[in-house]
Amino acid sequence: MITRITIRSATIVLLISFIFLSGCKDSNKTINEPNYEDITAQEAFSLIQDNKENKNFVILDVRTPEEYASGHLENAVNINFNSPSFQESLSTLDKNNSYLIYCRTGMRSSNAFEMMKSLGFNMVSNMSGGIIEWENNGLPTVK
C-alpha cells in the first residue's frame, strides 16, 4: 500500500512539474511585451518600409522646429526635446503605438528614448546615428 501511494505521489509531482516547466519555455515576443532598441539608419529605413500601412507606427523627430524645417523623415511628427513641455507632450502620446525616434546625431533621441521607457511606452526604436547617419547613407528626407 505504501508503495502504491509513493508511486502515485511521485507521478503526480512529476506531472505537475512538467506542466509548470513547459510554461517557462522561451517564446517570441508578443505585441504586449515592451521592446526597446537602438537601431542604425538602414535598420530604421527598413522599419519604416515595413510599417508603411501601419497607422500605429509613429516617426518622432525630437529636434527643434528649425532643424525639422530644414529636412526630416517623411511623415515625421516634431516634438522639440528642448521645449520645457517635452515630457508633458510625450505623456499625451499613445503608449501602445510603435515609435521610431531620431534627432540630429542621436544624443537627444537617446535621452527621449530613456524618458519614453520610464513613461511606459511599449515599442520604441531609437535611430542612434540621427538624421546625420540617415543622410550619410543617402536616404531621403522631405522639407
Image (cartoon, grey):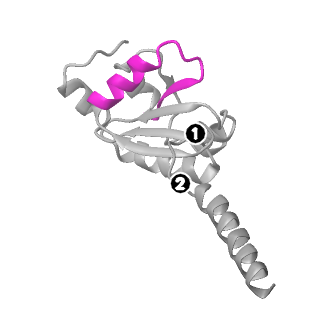
Residue 55: say if magenta. yes
For residue 131, say whether it is visible. Answer: no
For residue 56, say whether it is visible. Answer: yes
The residue at which mark 1 appears reads as 30
Say how many tags the image has.
2
Q: Quadrant of residue 118?
A: bottom right
Could you say whether the residue bearing mark 2 is in a helix, strand or loop?
Answer: loop
Q: Which residue occupies 41% across, 44% down? A: 37
* Residue 91 at x, y percent in the picture: 67, 41
**Along the horizontal axis of the image, is 117 left or right of 11?**
left
Q: Which residue occupies 30% across, 40% down? A: 105
Which residue in the rendered view is the most extreme toward the front?
A: 1
- Amino acid type for the residue under numbered disc 2: Lys
Q: Is residue 60 above or below residue 15?
A: above
Could you say whether the residue bearing mark 1 is in a helix, strand or loop?
Answer: loop
Give the magenta part as a residue range.
Answer: 42-63
Quarter that holds the C terminus = top left
How crowded is the residue under tag 1: few (<14 C-alpha within 10 Å), some, or many (20+)?
A: few
**Along the horizontal axis of the image, is 86 left or right of 141?**
right
The residue at which mark 2 appears reads as 25
Q: Quadrant of residue 88?
A: top right
> In the image shown, does 105 or 120 lie closer to the viewer?
120
Residue 29: say if magenta. no
Distance (Cα) linking label 1 and label 2: 14 Å
